[in-house]
Image (tube, grey):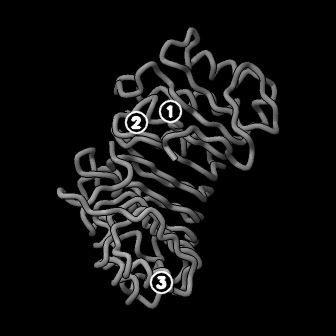
């Protein structure tokens, strides 16, 4: 969760890079607000270590004193691209392991990450946090298996780039679309491309998370062919209520799943009980009460 830094990555314990590399650990490169060293110097030192040639995973945390400043947003992308020849085995990247105490998720400024995918043709896993300025461009990648985008508000233009992406081996697709007050500006049609099995034919996990129109997504899943191939549907952290839950119950394809994640929801207790009786594993934890001004996603600001 965004309140804590990653403690494991690619089944390895995560430690902050402090000068040497051990192959049994995953390293996070970051600076503090008042660090005496620069992010660039740490990256350089990391890549000059003889063991960098064997590194498969890297986590980039706070890369500037204030990562809400857009003029520095391209720095981590440039650093990875410039050092591609020194990291020939890099396959797992987490860009933006930044907790809310370091910077609110809706304030993190990102950039066009497409150059990373071009620089690392063997990349299998890519996770990014923060939606401001985030772009994927014309994304094409034959090796990528996992793509996770965590935001407090993700613009429809960026989601449209993902809808047009060519990722033939993608197995895990997860986006947090967030709140309209922080950048989300789409509608249910924004998600339509992801509801077809033709989009990502090897998909096993579909996560349309942290969304303020989860009921509409649940209704749109009627007859969705993606339910014929995935084993996990993740609608967690959003605004699912009884209307969306009823649509899921009426959808026979839901029973093809192994796991249905509805954690953080607005279903009534009666509907929660009905959903829990589905012949699949269901997470209905963290039931919310609708407030005077409506429902809220779990992660926004």
Residue 125 located left or right of residue 2: right
Q: Are marks 2 and 3 in contact (CB under 8 Å)?
A: no
Q: Which residue is mark 2?
A: 111
Q: Which residue is mark 1?
A: 77
Residue 254 is labelled as: 3
Using the image, determine if residue 242 lies above or below residue 10: below
Q: Position of residue 209 (x, y in %)?
A: 41, 60
| Rendering quarter of residue 52 | top right
Nearest to the eye among marks 2 and 3: give it: 3
Q: Tag 1, which secondary structure?
A: helix
Q: Residue at x 49, y 67 (%)?
A: 206
Specify which label sits upstream in the sequence, 2 or 3.
2
Spatial CA distance of label 2 from label 3 is 36 Å
Crowding around mark 3 (Cα neighbors within 10 Å: few <14, some 14 to 19, many 20+) is many
Q: Are marks 1 and 2 in contact (CB under 8 Å)?
A: yes
Closest to the observer, 52 or 220:
220
Using the image, determine if residue 105 lies above or below residue 30: below
Q: Residue at x 64, y 45 (%)?
A: 92
| View extreme (left): residue | 293
Where the C terminus falls, by quadrant? top left
Q: Tag 2, which secondary structure?
A: loop
Q: Residue at x 41, y 51 (%)?
A: 138
Residue 8 visible to the viewer? yes
Closest to the observer, 89 or 96:
96
Spatial CA distance of label 3 from label 1 is 39 Å
């Amino acid at each position: 969760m965004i309140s804590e830094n990653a403690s494991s990555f690619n089944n390895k314990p995560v430690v902050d890079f402090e000068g040497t590399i051990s192959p049994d650990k995953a390293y996070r490169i970051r600076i503090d607000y008042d660090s005496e060293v620069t992010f660039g110097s740490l990256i350089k030192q990391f890549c000059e270590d003889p063991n960098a040639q064997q590194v498969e995973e890297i986590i980039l945390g706070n890369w500037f004193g204030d990562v809400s400043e857009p003029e520095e947003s391209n720095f981590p992308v440039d650093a990875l691209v410039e050092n591609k020849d020194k990291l020939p085995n890099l396959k797992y990247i987490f860009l933006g392991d930044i907790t809310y105490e370091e910077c609110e998720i809706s304030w993190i400024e990102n950039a066009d990450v497409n150059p990373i995918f071009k620089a690392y043709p063997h990349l299998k896993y890519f996770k990014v946090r923060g939606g401001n300025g985030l772009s994927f461009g014309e994304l094409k990648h034959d090796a990528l298996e996992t793509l996770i985008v965590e935001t407090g508000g993700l613009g429809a233009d960026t989601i449209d780039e993902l809808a047009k992406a060519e990722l033939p081996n993608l197995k895990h697709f997860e986006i947090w679309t967030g709140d309209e007050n922080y950048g989300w500006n789409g509608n249910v049609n924004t998600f339509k491309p992801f509801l077809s099995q033709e989009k990502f034919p090897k998909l096993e996990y579909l996560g349309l998370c942290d969304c303020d129109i989860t009921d509409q997504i649940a209704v749109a899943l009627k007859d969705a062919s993606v339910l014929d191939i995935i084993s996990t549907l993740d609608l967690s952290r959003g605004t699912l209520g009884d209307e969306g839950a009823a649509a899921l119950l009426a959808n026979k394809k839901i029973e093809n799943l192994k796991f249905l994640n509805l954690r953080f929801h607005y279903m009534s207790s009666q509907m929660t009980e009905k959903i829990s009786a589905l012949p699949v594993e269901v997470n209905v934890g963290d039931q919310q009460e609708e407030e005077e001004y409506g429902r809220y996603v779990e992660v926004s600001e």
